[in-house]
Image (cartoon, grey):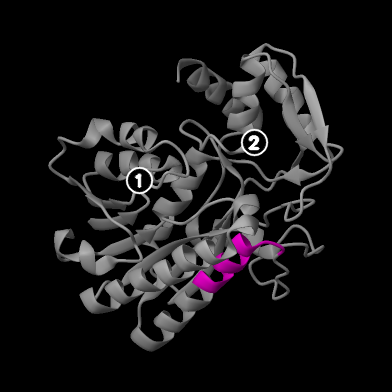
Amino acid sequence: MRILLTGGAGFIGSHLVDRLLAEGAEVTVVDNLDSFYNPAVKLHNISTHTDDPGFTFVQGDICRVAEFGEQIPDPVDVIVHLAARAGVRPSIADPTGYQHVNVAGTQSMLELAKERGVKHFVFASSSSVYGVNPNVPWSESEMTLRPISPYASTKISGELLGHVYSHLYGIRFTALRLFTVYGPRQRPDLAIHKFSKLMLAGQPIPLFGDGSTERDYTHAFDVIDGIRSAIDYDDELFDVFNIGSDEPVRLSTLVDLLQDVLGVEAKIDRHPEQIGDLPRTWSNLEHARDRLGYQPRVDLRHGLATFADWIKRA
């Protein structure tokens, strides 16, 4: 199998590279090594594969495919599109930049799929597309999407573009709505990583709101299982799947668990709720279980314990 993977040097992408190469796939990673966080971290994520004959790394911007397109081996069986500008709060500060990368960049990759005759396009969407929809747990059949951040709106746009290209050009488009992914290599701006670093350094952690917000925390290894199943999906020409844990956890409970696995007490620095933050995320996994055979395996306490081991060595 020949995979073109965008964003493959990042947190989720590098774990997928590990999995695909172990299975004998040929993987071409396109990543621009964006400075959102230290590019050296991303290069380290994929450093063990640089001598693998099945691995190709291309540094390139998904909005400028013409600049690196000739470096992509032909043919490509599946495009897995993970590259995006990430984060809800930063998107509020730079909505235009997020629109450019996440929407125009996705369209550029869909154009590449059309031109190269790629039959399957797997797209990393987000649970944030559901927004403030009160009908939990959220199901993919839910038509009332109420995004409250520019980031969320770009992910909805990506899904809709996928439907267009699926309808017009027969490209199978499989969108995965990922729910709060954590685990080794997690981005440093995300809560679990940020809190852990501060707690281990004896510094206060910023807690927005009263700690009652809830998140459907999903371990990276479960997400990789979901993406891997999606790569093999060959049923509906256009489909959307939740990839989560189906177990929302309060922020205050998360802090308690981190104290346990890190062996340190958290110092709390309270702040008002942030605009763009959702009160709760909760995945209905019936569709993913039925069509992808997806079943999360890593419970939060165990996942945080392995994360704690990793971050103490990082």
Q: Looking at the magenta stretch, what is its main secondary structure? A: helix
Task: Give me the residue at 32% from left, 59% from top.
Answer: 61
Asked if residue 76 shows in the view, the reply is no
| Left or right of residue 52: residue 18 | right
Q: Where are the magenta residues, as a range?
A: 148-158
- Tag shown at residue 191: 2
Q: Earlier in the sequence, mark 2 or mark 1?
A: 1
Give the tally of numbered discs: 2
Q: Position of residue 310 (x, y in %)?
A: 48, 21
Circle 1: residue type: Leu
**Is 156 covered by the magenta stretch?**
yes
Taking 184 as reference, is 140 above or below it? below
The reply to whether callout 2 and callout 1 are in contact (CB within 8 Å) is no
Residue at disc 1, secondary structure: loop
Residue at image mark 1: 33
**Is 94 covered by the magenta stretch?**
no
Asked if residue 238 shows in the view, the reply is yes
Residue at disc 2, secondary structure: helix
Residue at the right extreme of this rendering = 210
Taking 298 as reference, is 243 above or below it? below
Q: Nearer the viewer, residue 11 or 62?
A: 62
User: Which quarter of the picture shows residue 44?
Assistant: top left
